[in-house]
Each structure stands twice: as structure tokens, then as C-alpha cells.
Image (cartoon, rainbow, N blue to C red):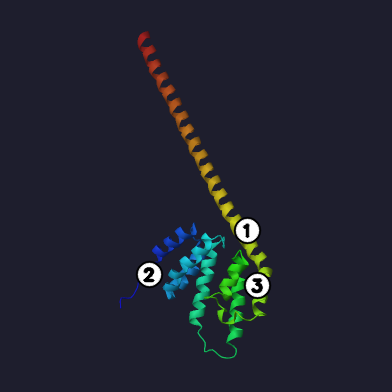
Amino acid sequence: MTEETYDWLELRERATSAFGAGVSADLEERVLDVFRRHPAIVSTSVEHVAQRFRQGLIRSPWVIFAKHVEEATRAVENVVVSDGSEKARAVKRAEQWMRTAGVYFDRVEEVDDELFGDLGRLKDYRSDNALRPRLLSMWETERPRGLAAEAESEARAVKYLADRRRADELGQHERLRLTAEAERKAAEASVEVAARVAERENVGVGS
């Protein structure tokens, strides 16, 4: 069987196109750290996150993407034998996911699907009538923190664009100033040359 190969630059380009924006250096390093160990997880997660982004369920796809692949990797690397405490461990992992990634989901229905859907972290415990409401209530409590982080991220992006635009404007102003200065000096030089020529001509006539 031919072993499948993965190219990080190609995958990053695909994710950038799907997410509608480039990735910051710190988020890229987090994703790349997972990619070096589990490239297939990163590759298959692009569409998973992109679909939610297209549906308007998340607003910071790169943030969600980084957290998603990290969570998926931990699940793979920390396989344990199921016993009486497996449910407790699964719930603990779900609570951690809620605090780090779930807070960035916009709708409670999406959180419910991530936790108790067919591929959810707690799919085996979806019939627990006490657990489900507790975790969804936890999301409602934690969600304002995610909104604040998103607002801060958007504010940084707006400031970055404003700073870039201001720098471009200043650069253009400086280029115009230098061009005007060069033209002024050229004009002065032309006047000076013309004056010298006229002076020589007058001297010649006087002689």
C-alpha cells in the first residue's frame, strides 16, 4: 500500500482559502506542531472547521482549527483502557474542550453536536439527562469569554490594517515630498544654468 504524503505549504494554502484569511505565526506554529506528528488529523480537520465557518457557526476559524487539532491529537495519544472511570475522564476532557475551544462556537446547537452528536466526544453518554444540560449550561456561562477574545482579536486586526494603511499613506506622502523636492532642485538648477548661459552671451556681446 502506498503511504500517503502531506505537504504543509499546500495544506496551509488550502486552509487559508477555506477560512478566508491567513494564519498568525503563533497559531501556525501550534498547528504545525500537530502536523509534524499527525498530518492526517490536520488535513481532515480543514474541511471540518471550514464547514462550520461557512455555516456561520464560528468567526475565528484558525483559532478553532488550532484547538481542534490539538484536542484530536491528545485523544489519539492518550488512549486508555475503558473502565469505570472512563466516563469521568471523558467528561473532564469535554469540560476542558469547552473552556479552550467550545467558547468560540456561536450556537448551542453546534456545541451539542460536538459533544453529543454521532461523532461527539460524549456520544456514548448522550442519554445522560443530567450531564447534557450541565455542559450546555457551562457553555452559556463560558461563551462571553470567547466573545471577548474574538472582539479583541478583531480589534487587533482592525488596528493592524489601520496601521498598515497609515504607514502606506505616510510612505506615499514621503515619496511625493521627495519627488517635489527633486523637481524643485532640478528647476533651480535649470534656472542657474540658463542664467550662466545668458551671462556668457552678454559678455560675448560686450566684447
- Give the residue at x 62% y 72%: 99
In the rendered image, which residue does mark 3 sit on? 136
**SS for tag 1?**
helix
Task: Choose mark 2 or mark 3, whichever is in front.
Answer: 3
User: Would residue 125 appear left or right of 9 to someone viewing this image?
Assistant: right
CA gap between label 2 and label 3 equals 36 Å
> At which x and y percent is residue 79?
50, 84
CA gap between label 1 and label 2 equals 34 Å
145 is higher (above) or lower (below) than 2: above
Sequence order check, earlier mark of 1 and 3: 3
Residue farthest along the top direction in this orientation: 206
Report the front residue among 71 and 84.
84
- Of the numbered discs in the image, which one, if any, rests on residue 151? 1
For the C terminus, the image quarter is top left
Q: Amino acid at mark 2?
A: Tyr
Report the front residue among 114 and 195.
114
Q: Residues within 10 Å of mark 1 (few under 14, many from 20)?
A: few
> At which x and y percent is residue 36?
43, 73
